[in-house]
Image (spheres, coloured by chain):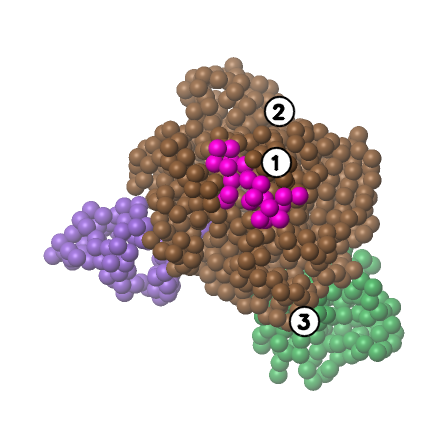
Chain colours: A brown, B purple, C green
Amino acid sequence: MIRPIAPQRILSVDLTRGETRVEVVPEEDVIKYLGGRGIAAKLLFQRVPGGSDPLGPDNALIIGTGTLTGTGAPSSGRTSMLCKSPLTGLYLKVSVGGHLGAELRYAGWDYLVITGKSPQPVYLSIADDRVEIKPASHLWGQGTRQADARLKQELGDPTLQTAVIGPAGENGVLFSAILCSRFNGASRGGIGAVMGSKKLKAITVQGHGGLRVSEGEPFYRLADAMRHELAKDSGTESLYNWGTSGSIPGLNEMGMLAARNFSQVTLEGADQLSGQHMLDDGYLIGRESCFSCSTACHRFVRSLDHRWGEVLDSGPELETVLALGSECGIVDTESALVANQLCNELGMDTISAGHAISWAMESFEREVISSLDTDGLELRFGNAAAVHEALRRIAYREGKLGDLLAQGTRRAADRVGQGSHRWAIQAKGLEQSAVDTRMAKGYALAFAVNPRGPDHLMTETFAEFGLSKEAREVIRTITGDEKYADPHLTEKRAEIVRWHEDVYGASEALGFCVFTSTAAFAVNPRNMAQLMSHALGTPFDEEQLMLGGRRMVTIERCFNAREGARRADDRLPWRMMNERVPAGPNQGMITDQAMLDGLLNQYYEMHGWDPATGIPRAETLETLGLLELCGDVAG
Amino acid sequence: MDRTAAIQVIVRTFGLRGRDSGLTRMPTGFCAGTTVRDLLAQLRAGARPGDRLASVQSDTLLVLINGRPIQYLSGWETVLRDGDEITCMLKTAGG
Amino acid sequence: MNPTSLTIESARCTACMACELACSFTKEGFFSPAFSRIKVMQVYELGVNVPIACVHCADAPCLASCPSEAIVRDEVRGVVSIVAERCSACGECVEACPYGAVHIPPEQELAVLCDLCGGEPACVASCVYGALRYERQPDAVYASLTVTTHGMDLPQKRWRVAEAVAERVGQAREAMP
């Protein structure tokens, strides 16, 4: 079936009853909410009532493909997956690349909404309009690589796309992941555990249809020009050369490299974890792209001396080598590759897993926990073997240690007490990504207000560093003056964060990788709106695009408010707010409560949210056309 | 090395020389008043044909002085001081 | 004389699929890999990606197999093509091609293969990595491999070709450029 971009189609699956149903998203909703993450957020708000058990049948796993995913728009293959998070009890959106989203669109589906719980392990097989719930008991217990291979063999198609959980998801590890297209992780917030709680082992997708945009020639010309523009960007070039871990030498030089559970900001030998080192020394043997992306930032690596085991897998990303490398006091390349492969196989989020282990290491070093609590494991910084062993135990919730850490650092610190909250690098229950929010104020605000918890994957204000002409131009557009391209400043951060929230939202709704619109800028609100206009065949402008972004951010806020989240939850990990940067060019910096309060006041005011609670006001909802949907929540 | 140089600095480049992405480091002497722009011109003048340094656009370089990006100092006109550590690398992005 | 087929350098391919999108859009006016004349096979386990397109064999098995003489070879330009009016979509050519480079798109009554877009291949223009080129000495790595694919269905056939290429690329691997 060759379909237009709108209206869009939802496949709803009730795993309790074993039933499926088709729904339609009308074109006016695609225009109002943009599609992708936007419509998915609306569906989550409507279908998962406040107070639902994240690991119960009432939670929904919602997959939202980008509205332009599957077209020739460059780097438009990103897909959003939403649910209520079992780790935080709040809104969760994860973004994943690879090729799954495009395949789903070619199969004729724009959204999957999966509710209920199957009595037995099953997998969902989607082959164009033929949808079946099939037995998966024979797959339960398998690692993601094995399960993927088995499914391809069973269905007789080595090219089908899969989304698979590993043992971690099956065992309800609260930061377990879904591995898509073999090695692309939909990872944060325990989304794997939600799939596991439904006894859904995998989703397989085979799509043979296509997408027709309304104004083909102008669409393709613009998309092609954007593709080539992106290929010339220097940020894109460095991502191709060295991947995301190419940032490591710069971060180390700038005293911004998270090390030893964020107690240090530089680490001797950290260059061993860098993309540059992996290229030069022969670890890198391939570069992979997500669907329709000409950047190829993904890596394919092998181990060389195999001292910690044999590796042949995709990854690792920057956050991974930080979380499982420098944060654990380890600068051994081979160790980082093995740790990444383990997380892929077992199906776990590397950021949370790494920070759970680094928290445990600091606790061990401080003698707050002992080898009795770790079942004999010497959990000291620098112990690579302990990291790998801890990952295995977490995935299977094995022993005291495995079970403790599988719940994430917030619950672990609750259990252990003795002030260990002070070194749990988490807020809202989610472990923070390894960006120093003490020195970068835009990041600090963005992380504090992020509905899923403090990380960079919903709003990353990279432009505030002003490292390129384009970045400074963006800051000038937002604030009126290039001088605000300075992360140490607290002025104008609310404006900068809001722009990024809206652009992130719009990018993800359309399927664009945010690297192209917020790290490079060849994809921007103007040309995104133009592509939408050509795709739909109706006028569609930048203002509508940003408004769509605004709406989804507001719906996400309302979801959290309904779950009881308030202003007090908008904060950073204790360490970021109470311990100053210990060394380097940013020594002494901090984002303390007073500073954060100032930033929050600006931010809530700008959004039209009640500053006491952080809840959107009724007038604000009305202006956005969200009163009917979210009105009950309004403060 | 200029033996009558007034200041001594350490210049480190990452990923700019030959096919090697790694770090090269050299102690170098310059006259007082040398700016970052002057430094880059001299590095380029000494670059060999295969070096990225020879072809790379200035705007794609991340230049740090003692760990601080030059954007927060005086940009390309920042004057080098005795004992400065200057690091040049390609800008990278990502998370 | 124009080159008679594409140069395909698998080691540079990242499986971005821009080529499949460019091809289906150029030939059909919409985006659908199932209609693309070039197919990229991702051999995940080795991290190697293999684009497969018609190499316009001198002794084309598809041409020999066609019962309605719908496949012809232009001896001057060296390009194999399908004469639409004579094609009955019987599928013999799909069976005969050892690489899986000719296929019948979903719900169509016509077999299709790469015709080089009349001299300016759209896929080449879309490939920023230089994995696809249109140059004087065309070379597609699988054209020089002996791969047994007889009797396999289309997806299996392409996969077998891709695996053979991936093994070859894997063996030749050194430090990346």
Q: Measure how far apart labels 2 and 1 are at the Cα level.
A: 37 Å
Q: Is residue C35 above or below residue A628?
A: below
Give the magenta-colored segment's residue range: A607-628
Q: Chain of mark 2?
A: A
Residue in the picture at 62% in, 68% down: A220
Left or right: A297, with A179 as reference point: left
Hey, what amino acid is under mark 1?
Answer: Val
- Residue A427 coordinates in the image, percent (x, y): 49, 31
Which residue is the site of mark 3? C26
Image quarter of the C terminus of chain A = top right
Quarter occupied by residue C93: bottom right
Q: Measure how far apart labels 3 and 1 are at the Cα level.
A: 49 Å
Q: Measure how far apart labels 3 and 2 are at the Cα level.
A: 53 Å
Residue C147 visible to the viewer: no
Q: Residues within 10 Å of mark 3 (few under 14, many from 20)?
A: some
Hey, what amino acid is under mark 2?
Answer: Arg
Which residue is the site of mark 1? A633
Q: Point out the residue furthest to the bottom here.
A: C76
Asked whether the residues under the numbered discs 2 and 1 touch, taking CB atoms below 8 Å apart as contact, a structural biologist would say no
Image quarter of the N terminus of chain A = bottom right
Hey, what amino acid is under mark 3?
Answer: Thr
Q: Is residue A320 above or below residue C17?
A: above
Same chain for the residues under marks 2 and 1 in the image: yes
